[in-house]
Image (tube, rainbow, N blue to C red):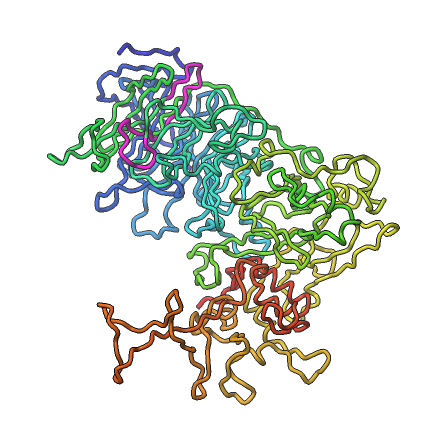
Amino acid sequence: MTPFMLHRSLFSLPLLATVTILLAGGCSSKTNTGEIDDIEPDPVVIDIPLAYVERPIPVDEDGNRLEDDLLMPQAFNPGAILYLKDRAASSARRLDISSPAWEEGALYDVKDLSASYDGERLLFAMRAPEIENADDDEQPKWDIWEYDIPSATLRRVIADDIQADIGHDVAPRYLPGVERRIVFASTRQTRARAILLDDGKPQFSALDDGRRNEAFVLHVMDNDGTNIEQLTYNQSHDFQPTMLPDGRVLYSRWDRLPGNDQLSFYAVDPYGMRQSILYGYHSQNTGTNDTEAFFLRPTQLPDGRIFAIHRARTSREYGGNLVAIDVENYIAADQPVAGGSGSEGQTAVYPLTVSTDDSLSINGIFHSASPLFDDTGRFIVSWSRCRIINPDNDLPAACDEDTDDTALLADPLYGIYLFNPTANTQQPILLPVEGRMLTEPTLLLPRTADNLIPPPVADIDYSATLAEQDLGSLHIQSVYDFDGTDVAGIANLRNPANWGSLERPARFLRLVKAVSIPDNNVLNFPGSAFGRSAANGMREILGYVPIEPDGSVMVKVPADVAFTFDVLDAQGRRAFPRHNNWLQLRPGEQANCGGCHTRQSELPHGRPDAEADSANPGAPTTGLPFPNTDPALFADMGETMAQTYARINGLRTPSVDINYVDEWTDPALLTPETGFNWTYADLSTSQPAGGACDSGGNNWSAQCRVTIHYPDHIQPLWTTTRTNPADALEDWTCTSCHTDRDDMNAAQIPAGQLDLRAEPSPDQQAHFIGYRELLFNDAEQELVDGALVDRLIQATDGNGNPLFETDEDGNLILDGNGDPIPVMVTINVPAAMSSNGAANSARFFNRFEQPPGVDDTVDHRGYLTEAELKLISEWLDLGAQYYNNPFAVPVN
């Protein structure tokens, strides 16, 4: 082939280079690293500096190939080397720019290459060699390094050893601007650690929602490694950042709450504000034969689309297909944004079929790639041909169209090539080497910088008053808006004249905070602490506010914490499904949400530029109140009721109590509704609210946490002394009846087959009997000879016919009298409560709300106070955890 020449870069390496390494403490050394490749002259020469990583194929101690897991950014695969060539050609000298940082022969790892906009600098992540016999928590961390081409200088960006060792730092990218600030993913969780101290806990990096590894989240820092600031607060990974043309940071986010396990593209500005989903939440199964596939190493294309590797989450082939994603017009593969154009959300760039699921891929697979950022549309790619093991000689052999899909795949063989999609050509630049992988090809050429978003301005881009209090604000236009559809009749609900005939399903909003979980090196506590449903993790309540009659809410929210919310009914119980996605606000940030969304819906949601218009029409005119409402609450045209209230009275401040006052009805026209107040101050048992919450007062702050533990706050409800208000001699204490012993200490059947004792359960010694009986199915018991035993009945088949024991041939087994032996089974007693929430725990609540004979209940009305029922309801809505603070768990 004829060599393809481009104009020479302004910055080229000398043929023999000297590398200067700047290390912590001001040390430096110089090493001559010039070297000539032995590869034959290649047919393509690109006269631009090329960086790439050469690494051995990862294997375990037995030589078996290891899987690459996208959700293990901290994985260490030693033996990698970062090379730099003054030209993208095999004949060009290659400079080892990473090894001089270590002793000769050291086995370190390097990855995540990224070039500066001017092409003069290279960012990457590098991890020091393994420390022999050291524990995992004592091993080196991943660090961010920078190589300066004109000066041939290598330095660790965070020079201070103590600061560098706080967490794993990976995936660096330059932000636009002359300051060359850096965005990166890290487990250091800088701001989250500080908030832990405010909460009275030790500093640590929290585990992801699956409690497998410390969570990576986005941070920014100055080019000298100072002024590190946390941008995102997801409870699972936020990683793989890259820049969008408008100056926002695109990144991959792992949503891992119950019912979710998605990797999607999100976007956020360089200051952590305006976070939103961008693409892919409903495009998880777009791989080969509709298998699960995700996007790896995203980067921007000159036309604004996002380019990525499309591959399986775990892969032993380490690659997949090339795909271009139209994030401007699509939010999922087949779901355009509102008003979007185009024919599909993602398009394969390679003209031939490439597998994404580690199956036989006749046309090879791609490990990594980057565009040339010129007008040719070309890419420089790391590509491996398809190879199988020849069964005749156990040697690698090339695949062809007749290769059986079940053939044993040989090790991949990644080299570096120039791919031209316009001409459908792929030409070698660096030929592969058996047992090695040439990956992450990165051209260091000047390119146009993305838009620079200036720092936010106080009281223009954010509220300075809220920021001073470590707060943001959230505006939900209407909880009755589902994907732009009014599901409840907002115009009728906002008119107090209709309240007598219409049920308002949404009355309060509960703000819920994630609880950070440490790894075992920080605190080794038992999994039983999570209780019935470990998937819900641990959660705390931040507070409550009323939902306005039109379904709108404007509320203060603590900044820099992962939070979600529950929509509650008039009884203070979750009325809508859990919102199983974590949200965040930066100090002073004022976020807007259109409405709600069902898990099954694939319509755009959570991305302001993609959603349908709000279903809440807002006020019809300016200067007048909403129909039949207090004239003091006069609206501006288009305002939601929450906006009107906030403009006149200020943002609503959460309270840990549920308070209702009818502030909307015009008393001159209608009788206002009767209010109520359910407060922790009315509890006779221990209150779960901390000092910053001020139950019954008005001093709520961003540090407020309501932390409910079953042993401390729920179990005492069953044992506290109660009497009939109408007859003080009648004992209403729960455990006076719901126990296995009567007043004479004789065995008895617990009332309703429900034992509420505060004693260790035989099923789980770490739980009280009462907890297990309330939340787990049980067997009905009876008294036999003064002892409690499980009651047995004869089992029946699906047609109601009695069942008898049979041998392996199906013949009846007879007893000593020649009679068939019946199959005996226990009788199930269903759990009275559900960790799915109070609304799913009717078997318990009906006893306290309905008269006898309704839904087969006993009459326990009045036994528990409204404050106690609120406490039980919110605990169940959180997930019925046994503990909601790992540091409160008894540890032996």
**Rendered position, 291 above or below 362:** below
Q: In the image, is 658 to the left or to the right of 271?
A: right
The picture places residue 342, in percent across and down from the top left corner, at: 51, 23
User: Is 363 inside the magenta-drawn segment?
Assistant: yes
Q: In terms of secondary structure, what is the magenta stretch mainly?
A: loop
**Rendered position, 77 above or below 32:** below
Rendered residue at 61%/67% (across/down): 846
Say which quadrant the N terminus sits in.
Answer: top left
Q: Which residues are magenta?
A: 355-379
Relative depth, front residue between 707 and 194: 707
**In this orientation, does residue 224 appear?**
no
Q: In the image, is 254 to the left or to the right of 111?
A: right
**Rendered position, 790 above or below 567:** below
Say which quadrant the C terminus sits in.
Answer: bottom left
The picture places residue 333, in percent across and down from the top left corner, at: 46, 32
Rendered residue at 69%/39% (across/down): 616
The picture places residue 359, in percent across and down from the top left corner, at: 28, 36
Q: In the image, is 604 to the left or to the right of 652?
A: left
